Amino acid sequence: MKNGRDIIGRRALLRGATLGGSALILSGCDALNESDMFRSALRTAETLNQTVHRSLMDRAALAPEFPASDISPVFKTNGSLTGTSAEYLAHVDNKFADWTLRIDGMVANPMDVSLETLRAMPSRTQITRHDCVEGWSAIAKWQGTPLRLLLQQAGLSARAKYIVFHCADSYGAQPYYESIDLIDAFHPQTILAWGMNGEMLPLKYGAPIRLRVERQLGYKHAKYVMRIEATDDLTKFHGGKGGYWEDVGDYEWYAGI
Amino acid sequence: MANNMAQRHKATTRIWHWLNAIALMVLLMSGLMIFNAHPRLYWGEYGSREDRAWLEIDDTRTTGFVKIGATTLETTGVLGLSLGTDDKVRRVAFPGWATIPTRYNLGAARRWHFAFAWLFALGLTGFMAASLLNGHIRQHLHIRKAEWAPKHIWSDIKNHARLRFDAHNAGTYNILQKFSYAGVIFILLPLMIFTGLAMSPAMNAALPWLHDIFGGRQSARSIHFMCAALLSIFVLVHLLMVFLSGPINGIRSMITGKVAQAPESNPTGVTS
């Protein structure tokens, strides 16, 4: 391949010279960005967003729902397009007939729930917008089991603070996982979706079930969920920040903004 | 001249001006990094690679381009495809020298953006409240009836075109200044905040009317970007005007509050 300079040419050189000043400011910003102290100061502002959202907003406020005419003609696929664990791939071959969702951790009655049982439970259908942290949005109709019903059945401990979702997909050696607090876990629109646009949830969108947590960004909506674990401490999972992208991409755990 | 110094800018105006200058610069540059994560704009509620964008910045691996509607402009070297400081070609919408951080990092850019958004929003609110109380809005930004007259506006346009900036009038703003300052303070800056909030899924649940007025989340994102572009143009014209109308006096007055006035100063501030 040609050298970058050959492709872009003299204009870029000229630009480099005139923008020396801006480069100075920028290297300053980059240096600040490397500083742990500065990063934690910025993070304080992020915590402020969560605190303000949680204290000023109605905790049960519903995310907007849309008419069927607003459904995206093609819902962009994103992240993993299939689960990767051997166990998961065997379930795909078997059309999820023996698949069960494990619910454990800080619950009185750990359970294994089959897809059939999940689908027979009361469900909620909602046409909602999926907002990616990158900036794009897509709308689809989701049908699934409200998470709160499962947590009630399992007898969630009063000491539990978070719900962790363990997934069958992975990036290299790192399995995907996510977590939410109990405000979102018990929110009426928080469902384990097994249906999408009137059909069984397709493989590339997270079959057999994916989380919908409608007041947060897309990376919280874990696909290929295999196990739900109640906990009071997120630091003991993987990188300790409560989710794959939180650990790897330094994204915020609270993704309401 | 220096012995004839007059008070020009109030302390609240000066403090806010510089705080806001820093906040807007960081917000713009971190915002361009966030935009780089998905350099396409849409109208309506939804929009992704699967949908038609009204604006996109992309590359063909050897050229960079901006596409607006059906028009494509080649922008190699700046937009879509540019050189990094290491001389490597970067296939990014906005080049590294325009973004915070320089290298692609969405998580960090969002953290910068949301932290400085607090400084910006609280600063603007404080400045508006102070300016209402201390008379800045009434004395300097309020457009009087006579100033709305087309003849008056036209004469000010002519003065600007001839680069006549009425040094003896330095205690007040002319009508074009008032239009641009009031437009920025009361329209563009608040729009940045509201369109920004309208992109937050949690805010959409708390205040659904907010994203409804902008016509959906992707429309709010488009308006956010357009207002940022207008603000950038405002800053460039503002800097040009400071330069043309006497940069030393202008910058000094925004730091110390004092401005050197010509002896034949016209205290009424009305241009003849």
Image (tube, grey):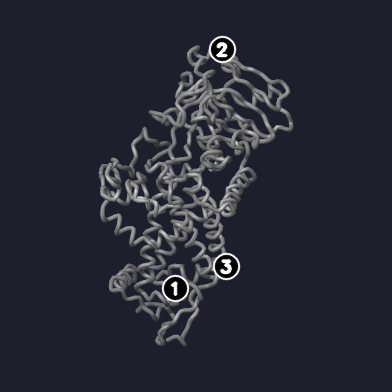
At mark 3, the secondary structure is helix
Amino acid carrying mark 3 in the image:
Leu
The answer to whether marks 3 and 1 mark residues whose Cβ atoms lie closer than 8 Å is no
Mark 1 Cα shell of 10 Å, populated few (<14), some (14-19), many (≥20): some
Q: Position of residue B134 (x, y in %)?
A: 56, 70
Q: How many marks?
A: 3
Q: Nearer the viewer, mark 3 or mark 2?
A: 2
Residue for badge 1: B251
Task: Name the foreground residue: B237 vs A177.
Answer: A177
Q: Residue at x 49, y 23 (%)?
A: A84
Q: Earlier in the sequence, mark 3 or mark 1?
A: 3
Residue type beneath disc 2: Asp
Residue A52 falls left or right of residue B191: right
Indicate which label's residue lies in the foreground, 3 or 1: 1
Q: CB of mark 1 within 8 Å of CB of mark 2?
A: no
Q: Is residue A182 visible?
A: no
Q: Quadrant of the N terminus of chain B?
A: bottom left
Circle 2 marks a residue in which chain? Answer: A
Q: Are marks 3 and 2 in contact (CB under 8 Å)?
A: no
